[in-house]
C-alpha cells in the first residue's frame, strides 16, 4: 500500500515553545490530509481536515490559532503546535487520502508522541 | 449522522482461541468499512476493508463481512496468536471523512 511518513516520531519540548510535525505522502499525491489526536487508551479524535492549497477545516473545539495546519503541496502537510503546554501532550497521527482513493482507504503515518514539559 | 460503535475491551484470550470483535455503524449513504490495527507506539495500519454490502474483507486470518441488513462489520479470527495483541479500530468512510470506533484492546496470552 501507499506510504505516509510522519516526522518526528517523538518530541519533547519546553512549555511555551512551538513544535512542527510533518506528514508526507511518499508515493502518491495526497489531496486531503487529516490530523488526529489520540489520548491514552482512547480512539482518534479528528482535529482538522486539510485540502491541498486551501485552508484547513477544523473540528469544533479545536483552536485553529494553536494548531496551525499547512498543506502547501500534494505530498506534505504540517501541524504546528504553537506555545505548547503540558495539556497538549498527546499522540498525534496524520492520514492522507488521494482523490482516486476517496471512500476506499486512507493511509496513516506512524504517529508523533509529543511531550511538553 | 455517521458513527461507529464497537465492542469495548479490553479483551484477553488464550492463544488459538476464537476472536470476535463486534462493530456496528450508522451512516448516511453507503460507507466503506474498515478494520485498522494499532500496535503500541505506532500509527494505524489497515487490516482489512469492504466497500459494499456482502463484501468480505480478509487478511492475516482475520475476516469481516459487510452486513447492510444489520449495519455490522464484525471482526473474526479463528485462532489468535500472541502477535495479534494490539488495539483494533473499526471505521467507516463515506468519502468525506473517517469515523472511528473507540478501539478494542486485545491481549493474547500464551
Image (cartoon, coloured by chain):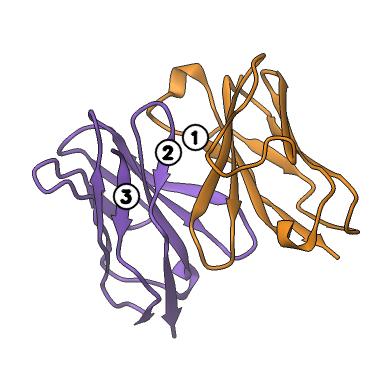
Chain colours: A orange, B purple
Residue B62 shows in the view: no
Which dot marks residue B98? 2
Q: Is residue B5 above or below residue A80?
A: below
The residue that mark 1 highlights is A106
At x 49% / y 70%, what residue is drawn? Answer: B83
Helix, strand or loop at mark 3: strand
Q: Residue at x 71, y 42 (%)?
A: A6
Q: Which residue is mark 3?
A: B4
What whole-number distance in Å separates the C-alpha atoms at marks 3 and 1? 17 Å
Q: Chain of mark 2?
A: B
Chain containing mark 3: B
Residue B18: name its quadrant.
bottom left
Name the residue at 38% across, 54% down: B101
Disc 2 versus disc 3: distance between alpha carbons?
10 Å
Vertical order, A91 against A83 (above or below) = below
Question: Residue A8, position in %: x, y?
Answer: 80, 47
Crowding at mark 2 (Cα within 10 Å: few <14, some 14-19, many 20+): many
Residue B102 horizontal/vertical position (percent): 41, 59
Q: Is there one chain holding both mark 2 and mark 3?
A: yes
Amino acid at each position: 500500500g501507499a506510504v505516509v511518513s510522519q516526522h518526528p516520531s517523538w518530541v519533547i519540548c519546553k512549555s511555551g515553545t512551538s513544535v512542527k510535525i510533518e506528514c508526507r505522502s511518499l508515493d502518491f499525491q495526497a489531496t486531503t490530509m487529516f490530523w488526529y489526536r489520540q489520548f491514552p487508551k482512547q480512539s482518534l479524535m479528528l482535529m482538522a481536515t486539510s485540502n491541498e492549497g486551501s485552508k484547513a477545516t477544523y473540528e469544533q473545539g479545536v483552536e485553529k490559532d494553536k494548531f496551525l495546519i499547512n498543506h502547501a503541496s500534494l505530498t506534505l502537510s504540517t501541524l504546528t503546535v504553537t506555545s505548547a503546554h503540558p495539556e497538549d501532550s498527546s499522540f498525534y497521527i496524520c492520514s492522507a487520502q488521494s482523490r482516486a482513493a476517496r471512500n476506499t482507504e486512507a493511509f496513516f503515518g506512524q504517529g508523533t508522541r509529543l511531550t511538553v514539559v | 449522522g455517521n458513527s461507529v460503535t464497537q465492542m469495548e475491551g479490553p479483551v484477553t484470550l488464550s492463544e488459538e482461541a476464537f476472536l470476535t470483535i463486534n462493530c456496528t455503524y450508522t451512516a448516511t449513504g453507503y460507507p466503506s468499512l474498515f478494520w485498522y490495527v494499532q500496535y503500541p507506539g505506532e500509527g494505524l495500519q489497515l487490516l482489512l476493508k469492504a466497500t459494499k454490502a456482502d463484501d468480505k474483507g480478509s487478511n492475516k486470518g482475520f475476516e469481516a463481512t459487510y452486513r447492510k441488513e444489520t449495519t455490522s462489520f464484525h471482526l473474526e479470527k479463528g485462532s489468535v496468536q500472541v502477535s495479534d495483541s494490539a488495539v483494533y479500530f473499526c471505521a467507516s468512510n463515506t468519502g468525506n471523512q473517517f469515523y472511528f470506533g473507540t478501539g478494542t484492546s486485545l491481549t493474547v496470552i500464551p
